[in-house]
Amino acid sequence: MNINQVLIILAARWRLVAIATLAVLGLALIWVLFAPDRYQATAQVLVDVRAPATVNVAGDPGVAPQLSPDYVSTQVDVIRSARVAAGAVRKLGILNDADAMDEFRRSGSQGDPETYFAENLARSLQITPSVSSRVISIAYASKRPQQASDVANAFADAYRDVSLELQREPARNEARDYRQSISDVAGRLAAAETQLATMRQQLGITATGPDGTDSEDARLVALSTQLAVAQANAAAQNQRAAGGALPDALQNPVIQSIQNEIAKDESQRQQLAAYAGPNNLDYRQLTGRLGALRSQLAQQRGMVARGAAVSSAQASASAAQMQRAVASQRARVIANQQAHGSIAALEENVQNLKTAYNALVAKQMQSSVLGAADQSNVVILSRASVPSLPFGLPKLLRLIVGALLGAFLGAVIAIVVELVDQRLRRSEDVEIWLGIPDLGSVRKPELAAPRPRLLGMTSRYLPGPADRMAV
C-alpha cells in the first residue's frame, strides 16, 4: 500500500476520520474543562562523598561504600521506602489534622493511619537522580500548590533524618556489642596476667626489661665483666710478684730515701779512704752506718716483695671467687631460660589479649562518636518553593494534542476498515489485486454537482468520473 492509496482511503472514509477526531477532541475538551490543575514542587538533595567516621582506625573502609556505582540508586530506594514516607507524614502533622483523620475513617482502611497516609503520599512522589552527579530531585504533584511544596520539603527532611539514623543505629549497636566484648576480653586479660604472674613467682622468674632480658641475665653480664677485670688484675699482680715487685720498690719513697743516704755516705767514705785510710774513726763510723742502711734497704725490699706476693694471692683468690660466682649465675640463667619456655605460651596469650583489647577500645570509641553524631552525608541542596503555574501541558496544547491524536486514531481505523472491506476504487487496483490488465473504463455521466474547492485540490489523487468503472 503506497501513499496514494492511503490518501484515497482517507478521502473515501473522511467521515470516519472526522468522527474519530471530533470524539477525541471532545474528550480532550472535557478533560481540559473538568480536570483540576495539578501543581508540582521539587526539592533537591545532595548525597555528598565524605568519610562518616570521625575516628580513624586501621583497616577502616572510609568512603569506599559511598564511591560504589550503586550508591545513588540505593539512596533513591531509601527515599521511596516506607520509613521515609512515614517520617514525612509525621513532619507534616497529618495525624493531628481532624479532616485527614475523618478521611481515613471514611476510607474504611483497617491498617495504621500513618501507613495509609504514607502510601497515599508516595503515589504522587517522583524521585529523579541526576545522570552525571550526586544530586537527587524529589518532586511531588498535588492539586494545591502549598501542599506540593510542603510534601516535597517534608520528604527531603525525612530522608536526611533517616539517613542520619541509618548511620547512628548500626554505630550504636556496634558500640553496645564492643562494650560487651571489651568487658569479656578485659576479664580474660586479667586472668591471664594473674596466671602469668603466679607462674613467674613459682619458677622464680622476674619481669623482663625493655630489651627483653630479665635481672638474672643482667646480673650474669655484670659478673662476667667483673670476672674479666679480676682475672686481668690477678695476672698483673702475679707478674708483679714474679718480678720481685721491682717497679714498686723503685717507686717506694722509703727505699729511695735509704738509697740516697747510702749513695751519700758511700761518697764520703771514698773520700776518707783516699786521705785518712781505713783505720780512721770517721771512716769506720761511715762503714758501720752503710751496713745498717743496706740492712734497712734489704728489709724494705723484702717488705715490698712480700706485699706484692700477698696482693697477687688476694687477686688470684678474688678471680677464683668471681669465676665461681659467674658459673653459679650462668647455671641460674640456664635454669631461667628453661623456665621461660614453660611460660612462653602464657606471655603470648597475654600479648594477644592486649592487642585485641586495644583494637576493641578503638572501635568502641569510633562507634560511640558515630552514634552521637548529628551530621550525615546528605545535604538539602534546594528546598521546594510554592509553584505558581500548573504542572503539565497548557490547555490549548492539550486540545491540539487531542485533535492530532483523534486524527491519527481515525486514520488508523479507516485503514483497518479498508483492509477488512477491500473495494476496487481505481483501474490500477484491478491489476494489483486481480492481476487482470485494464483494457478500458466506462465513464459515468457527470450528474453530480461540482466538487468543492478542497476536493478539487486533490483531484489528481482521487478517481474522477472517467476513472470509475463498473466491475
Image (spheres, helix red, strand yellow):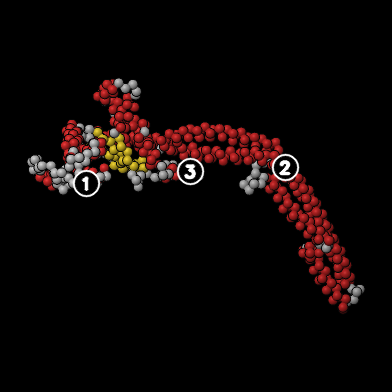
Residue 245 percent location from the top left of the image? 81, 62
Q: Label 1's element?
A: loop
Question: Can residue 254 be seen?
Answer: no
Q: Which residue is mark 3?
A: 60
Disc 2/disc 3 C-alpha distance (Å): 42 Å
Q: Are marks 2 and 3 in contact (CB under 8 Å)?
A: no
Nearer to us in this view, 449 or 207: 449
In front of the other: label 2 or label 3?
Answer: 3
- Residue at 9% of width from left, 42% of height from top? 446
Q: What residue would you read off at disc 2?
A: 338
User: Is 361 situated left or right of 18 in this image?
Assistant: right
- In the picture as drawn, the residue positioned furthest to the bottom comes out as 275
To which residue does mark 1 refer?
438
Q: Residue at x 83, y 69 (%)?
A: 262
Query: Residue at point 86% right, 66% down?
Result: 294
Q: Amino acid at mark 1?
A: Asp
Find numbered disc 3 in the image and state the secondary structure of the residue it sits on. Answer: loop
Measured in 3D between alpha carbons, the distance from the residue under mark 1 to the one under mark 3, in whole angstroms, is 89 Å
Residue 394's disc number? none
